[in-house]
Amino acid sequence: MSYRIPSPPPSLEDLAKRQQNVVTASQLRARGVPARIITEHCRRGGPWQRLLPRVYLLQAAEPTPEQRMWAALLYAAQSGREEDRRAGAVLTGAAALALYGFTAVPRLPAVTGVDVLVPRQRRLKDVGEVRIRRTERELEARSVHGLACAPVARAVADALAEWTDRPGGAPVREVLREAVALRENRCTARELVVELTDSGLTGVPRVRAALDELLAAERELTLGRIGDLLDESPLPAPLNAPELRMRGGTYIAVPDLYWPERGVAVEVDTELRCVSEGEAAWVHGGQHRMEYLGIRVVYVSGARLAADPDAVGGELREAYRVGGTDVVELMVV
């Protein structure tokens, strides 16, 4: 049987280097620094300073923006008096977006408030520029310049929630566009929909308008890629967004693409059309009616199309070859 010998904690020098000179009282005590020394070093003119409750900066100079972020995280992550009793905390909102590199938000030095996301059961108060936000979900963290940040979609939702409480305009459209365009830590439009819906922001007119614009652009991009794929195939051009009705005029659906001669429809990124429950019911109802009437429906996601266009092209060709099953005669409006 083998035993793993626990590694000793990093020295104060190593810890300070890793956390950009920001440490907690429990971390100092664990390394043999008594409370008396901490108090003496933080007096006026001393080599250290207190940034937040039980959080210290081991330098006399003004803290940098990154050190302010470290202080906020360490303040929110403290749990009890022992160093190994730590709770989760991640930066979110505008501070996280600034760290991610969003150009539509103020640069990090200009960020005046730091939002930190913690589990709902934590007993913490806002202090200084630190604002505590709570979540019932398990925390997810992305390391950005060594700092724990909420995923992009959650950070965007928290930033927009803060801005909607303030008078004046906010760069809502720009932030949503940047969120899906980031090269690193990129989020999907679907992740934005989930976070904005959960936070109730889809009920805010300017947020909903910007989200609808983004989703329409994402779907158009996918439809354009499908068009390019079909141009290189032997398949004839399908109809774009035709309205299908029964001979008596009863509405059936509006598929994204449709081959009436084969009874084959294509639906693109359905989830990007279903922001609300009512929209979801309307879209899925049309899809179910098409399938009930014998139409073969091919569902295509932008993510899969980007990852494996050959496979998607093969599915479309096979669906066209097989066609629908006993398709009811429909009117194309």
Image: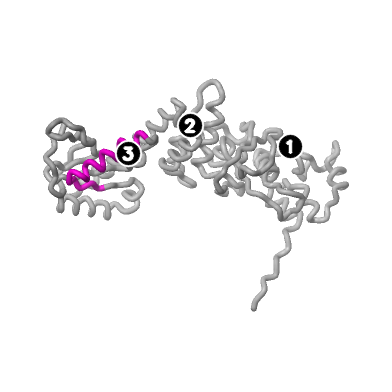
Query: What amino acid does circle 3 point to?
Result: Arg
User: How far across and how far down the image is residue 130, in percent?
Assistant: 67, 36
Is residue 29 a member of the stretch shown in magenta?
no
Magenta stretch: helix, strand or loop mostly: helix
State the residue position of label 3. 219
Callout 2 touching callout 3 (CB < 8 Å): no
SS at mark 3? helix
Q: Earlier in the sequence, mark 2 or mark 3?
A: 2
Residue closest to the eye, 92 or 132: 132
Q: Give, as a single range, the part of the protein colored magenta.
A: 278-298
Q: Disc 1 versus disc 2: distance between alpha carbons?
A: 37 Å
Q: Residues within 10 Å of mark 1 (few under 14, many from 20)?
A: few
Give the position of the C terminus as an image quadrant. Answer: top left
At x 48%, y 39%, the residue is 195
Q: Earlier in the sequence, mark 1 or mark 2?
A: 1
Query: What amino acid does circle 2 point to?
Result: Leu
Q: Horizontally, is 66 left or right of 292 in the view?
A: right
Figure check: 248 above or below 23: above
State the residue position of label 2. 201
User: How far across and how far down the image is residue 47, in percent?
Assistant: 82, 43
Query: What amino acid does circle 1 point to?
Result: Glu
Q: Earlier in the sequence, mark 3 or mark 1?
A: 1
State the residue position of label 1. 62
Q: Residues within 10 Å of mark 2 (few under 14, many from 20)?
A: many
Give the position of the N terminus as an image quadrant. Answer: bottom right
